[in-house]
Amino acid sequence: MTITLEQLNAAPRDQAAQWLLGLYEHSDWIAEKALDLRPFRSLAQLKHAMVQVLHAAGREAQLQLIRAHPELAGKAMVSKTLTAESTNEQSKAGLTDCTPEEFAHIQQLNADYNAKFGFPFILAVRGPRGLGLSRHDIIATFERRLHNHPDYELAEALRNIHRIVEIRLNDKFGITPTLGQQVWDWQERLAQHTDPGYAELGQLTVTYLTDAHRACAQRIAHWMNECGFDDVRHDAVGNVVGIYRADATQTHARTLLTGSHYDTVRNGGKYDGRLGIFVPMACVQQLAKAGRRLPFHLEVVAFAEEEGQRYKATFLSSGALVGQFDNAWLDQQDAEGITMREAMRHAGLCVEDIPAIARDPARYLGFVEVHIEQGPVLNEQDIPLGVVTSINGSVRYLGEVRGMASHAGTTPMDRRRDAACAVAELALFMERRAAKDGDSVATIGQWLVPHGSINVVPGCCQFSLDLRAPTDAQRDALARDVLAELQAICERRGVHHRLEETMRAAAAPSAPEWKNRWTQAVQDLGVPVFELPSGAGHDAMKLHEIMPQAMLFVRGLNGGISHNPLESTTCDDMQLAVEAFQHLLDHLTP
Amino acid sequence: MTITLEQLNAAPRDQAAQWLLGLYEHSDWIAEKALDLRPFRSLAQLKHAMVQVLHAAGREAQLQLIRAHPELAGKAMVSKTLTAESTNEQSKAGLTDCTPEEFAHIQQLNADYNAKFGFPFILAVRGPRGLGLSRHDIIATFERRLHNHPDYELAEALRNIHRIVEIRLNDKFGITPTLGQQVWDWQERLAQHTDPGYAELGQLTVTYLTDAHRACAQRIAHWMNECGFDDVRHDAVGNVVGIYRADATQTHARTLLTGSHYDTVRNGGKYDGRLGIFVPMACVQQLAKAGRRLPFHLEVVAFAEEEGQRYKATFLSSGALVGQFDNAWLDQQDAEGITMREAMRHAGLCVEDIPAIARDPARYLGFVEVHIEQGPVLNEQDIPLGVVTSINGSVRYLGEVRGMASHAGTTPMDRRRDAACAVAELALFMERRAAKDGDSVATIGQWLVPHGSINVVPGCCQFSLDLRAPTDAQRDALARDVLAELQAICERRGVHHRLEETMRAAAAPSAPEWKNRWTQAVQDLGVPVFELPSGAGHDAMKLHEIMPQAMLFVRGLNGGISHNPLESTTCDDMQLAVEAFQHLLDHLTP
């Protein structure tokens, strides 16, 4: 028997609690207590109510819940019919059919995990797509999580419990996130295309105008046509542009622009960029299937180049839409010496048509973009969607401190000119200074003592600086303080430095009316409204220069890791993103 | 007319002051005031008295003295007869005959130097050997010193002034440091031998049993024979051993052992190790010339291998003398795949004879070693010789911190697990902790974020630790605190680490009676007695295991830099080292 949300909202408390029995392992009090927050306008709201109940219950209750779970390792079983085929079969879910080596390894992991954390390892084994994780995935996750900080791992265990409950709840209510699954599956299929040399490594890398890149474009265009877009084209820089026309009665209809990029970083994730192409495609698919038209044109752009991996031309394709294609890029060479001009010619693109793809803002309502968060905030908050307040402004430097290389044994501490210690001091200052702002970030990502020897005091240290803040003024104040501190450190330590600014990007605050549209959509879905800035740059930054824009973030799993194969989110969260986008479309009155 | 020290000590003050006119540029008050400290037992004592007077006079007086000097750049002159030959002639001393480009460059350096420091550039252009520096050397020094910290550069200017005065004083007293010059010249000549590929770079590299290495051994043996050693041999590991026999009446004479190594690090200095071979050789040369015999045998060993460059077998040859030759070393391969066994066979060495070169301590009085300091202490103190109290014990580790690589833009400061910042915190702790001991040192010499990206929070940081202290207990306490802090940092930051101990060497305190012999020698030379530990390891560490030992350090120029072509000391300081060694020989009664 399946329940409806209306029934749950209307039922006497005992009856409602009865329906929710068995969601949390031996801990029905959580769902019961959540019922105080009825009525729920969506399952998402009920889920979050339960998250809040457990959060408020405190650490002891949380540990008790975790310990109420049977040990996952107890489910591991050595295959009775072990063959070469079965051991190589990665897709088979769960821990049955382990090899004896795997079984022993899992028992060891389990012992180590219990010894470190004092509670059993909990994993939502049905996974983000709901199809079940492979043995290989389960073991890799076990190994990885063993390295987590205890506080983080406690929270990760709870998140896995909430995910298990989410799937159980869907079952109880007979709900399947079909649109989220559709979006998930498109991404999974698109990730089969990867640049030469990366397939063997099992890595996803799609850089500008490679064979894999052009295959992705073909595939996206193919799916756009399947969805029912009226017009699907490859433009002069390799973007795939799909248009779903307005209601024919709207003779002067303007256009809502959306989309994101399909290129990736090297060994990147499957969702970065691509999610923002497929979410609106799923909406168009539904509109076309229902024969519905909107009072405005919807234009979905799959941007060809955002990551600047093959050529140093980050945001090339969204840049072209705002008339900023730099012809000097054409003469850049990739690592194999192929110029961008040659690569474009090879891909059948017409360089001379590039200026014509710049958009006339007068024809557009604005730009919206859905993107995976690429950060840990929504995951930590246990909230599936986030409304972006601003894309942070940033500035980057490459630097070098020069001190005096000297003998590590013979140079007293008070006579050293240690270049690396000067950078160390700067790094710790940057941590404190950025934290003071709350929403600024400051990073030394590259850090090297060239030709460093174990017994030589570093005479040189090379490093990078990456500073970001939600407004240009805040970023500039941050940069001013960091550079002043570097100067002061160097003077105090008797070392000197040089610094080269390599990038500067202005902050792009969301247009208030567009941000409000996302807020309204999220709220109407019963999802708590959570605002956050975007630390990463996005195509929306470029469109920002000619039209209003606002972004919606989708929670990432695994600590929100991105630019990494561990990047992930669930099909349930993707479903919510599609519903939010659909809501925005339905409520937009041009 | 030349003066004698006796005359100076006996003369009325006015007369004495008159004799010393013109030593310090327009600043005769310095020498005059130093006369208060008469009588002087040596020129070295007079020199140091003047150093003390200027030191006590304070910064203003020092600046006035510096500013009293004419600008060196004013002496630069463009050659009037500029030919290809003359422009290539590096050996010609001084700044006459500059090319127009050099002239312009010097003027620019001069302007930059004055702007940065506010005083003229002063350089003792007659150089450490007294023969005059080349244009090339002068310009390179100018460039290098422009980068110094202002406080350091002020002291460096004063040191150059004292060196100018030293040379003027030698002239006034008609004294030439001939033995120091002899030692200098041997080192200069020996430095012509360098391993293949380094000669073209103008670099000195002599690693175990290369052609250059064997040529050095031949040359040292040749000079030992010239000096009048009774017996000169190449032993089974490539050491050159020279023996100067005791007075024939001493039928049961024991042996004083001394020496140091002739191999070098890659791109090393000319004096590291070799000074400790040539100083006793100069003494034997004098003894033999005078037909004098000592009441003990003197055995000078030029050790073949101390630096562990070609093979990981540091202290191989002094190790062999204490019976610690490790046969496993023989199978080690160098970078070209040549085993040590093959290299030894090629050099004509008999591996089976190695055990026989182990020394019987009963036949030895002890071991003494002269070595360039390889550190900044004596240079800063303006003291030419230092008595070593102990060779520091050391321990080394290679380590790695693992945090979580994440997006530099999207990961808030309070949710990072930045591996490099953890190491940064450790580095600053180590600075403070080692400084607290006063004579401990702690260094992170290798420091790397592997595959670091400007926009990624470091997920991994690899580093080395080098910890040293004058006693094992002090070293162990230091290591304990550093490792505990690393643990605490990692726990606090939620990152983890691993650490591998790669080396541990016990401290080797000087034998008191042997240290006292050096002290007495230094004192009788009129040089202030200054004690210091050795931060670097030396052959004496090995001999320490079977006999009493004590070392004498000689001041290094250029901030005491070592393992570097800038390693340097003056022939005047080498002269003092020879005199101290001779004093030790003359006063040693077995």
Image: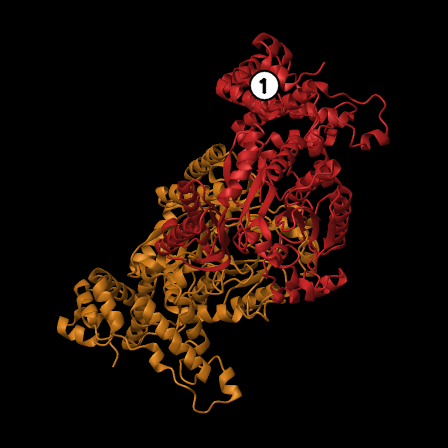
Chain colours: A red, B orange
Residue A518 lies in what quarter of the image?
A: top right
The residue sitting at 48% across, 79% down in the picture is: B90
Which kind of residue does numbered mark 1 sit on? Answer: Ile
Q: Residue reaching furthest bottom?
A: B81
Q: Mark 1 lies on which chain?
A: A
Report x, y in % for residue B267: 54, 63
Residue A339 seen in the figure? no
Is residue B88 found left or right of B21 in the rendered image? right
Instruction: Give the secondary structure at mark 1.
Output: helix
Quadrant location of the C terminus of chain A in the rendered image: top right
Choose between B264 and B376: the one closer to the eye. B376
Q: How crowded is mark 1: few (under 14 residues within 10 Å), some or many (20 or more)?
A: many
Q: Of residues B228 and B258, which is closer to you in this image?
A: B258
Residue A15 x, y percent position in the rendering: 61, 8
- Relative horizontal placement of residue A286, taking residue B246 as reference (left or right): right
Q: Position of residue A76 (x, y in %)?
A: 73, 21
B28 and B455: which one is in front?
B455
Q: Where is residue B158 in the image (x, y as percent from the top left)?
A: 30, 66
Whether residue A20 is situated above or below residue A575 in the rendered picture: above
Task: Kindly identify which residue carries mark 1.
Answer: A66
Left or right: residue B581 versus residue A569 is left
Q: Is B259 displayed left or right of B432 in the figure?
A: right
Q: Which is nearer the eye, A548 or B450? A: A548
Res A144 quadrant in image: top right
Quarter of the N terminus of chain A within the rendering: top right
In the depicted structure, whether residue A71 falls above or below residue B374: above
